[in-house]
Image (spheres, grey):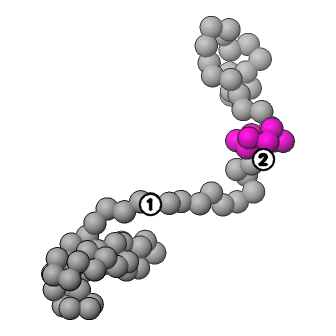
Amino acid sequence: MPVYEYECKSCKKVFEVQQKMSDGPLTNCPECDGPVKKIMSMNSFQLKGGGWYSDGYSSSGGGAKAAPACGGGGCQGCPAASSGK
């Protein structure tokens, strides 16, 4: 469930609430019962699963190499160009 951050307009307290995306926004502060507004906060995300580093995105160079961007050399030898033909 996402975590939303609110600020009370009366007591200026900033607090976080874990809510479903389908839940409506809070309207009252849990401390002073004053009006609250939802504020934007810094979001974070986590990359989970075994595929991230094995797909060549790690800086250690231990995984598979990422394909070069398409450019002046044509598509000869590109696995994406030869598949499905």
Q: Nearer the viewer, residue 84 or 20?
A: 20
- Type of the residue with mark 2: Ser
Name the spot of residue 13 as percent of width and height, x first. 28, 80
Q: State if disc 1 and disc 2 touch (CB < 8 Å).
A: no
The mark found on residue 9 in the picture is none
Residue 57: say if magenta.
yes
Residue 17 in which image quadrant: bottom left
Residue 73 in which image quadrant: top right
Residue to which mark 2 is pinned: 54
Q: Quadrant of the C terminus?
A: top right
Instruction: State the residue at coordinates (73%, 52%).
Output: 51
- Residue 32 makes an appearance in the image: yes
Up-down relation of residue 83 to residue 20 (above or below): above
Up-down relation of residue 45 to residue 38 (above or below): above
Name the spot of residue 44 as percent of width and height, x first. 50, 60
Instruction: State the residue at coordinates (15%, 81%).
Output: 10
- Type of the residue with mark 1: Asn
Which one is in front in this view, the residue at disc 2 or the one at disc 1? 1
Residue to which mark 1 is pinned: 43
Q: Secondary structure at mark 1?
A: loop
| Marks 2 and 1, how far apart at CA | 26 Å
Q: Residues within 10 Å of mark 2 (few under 14, many from 20)?
A: few
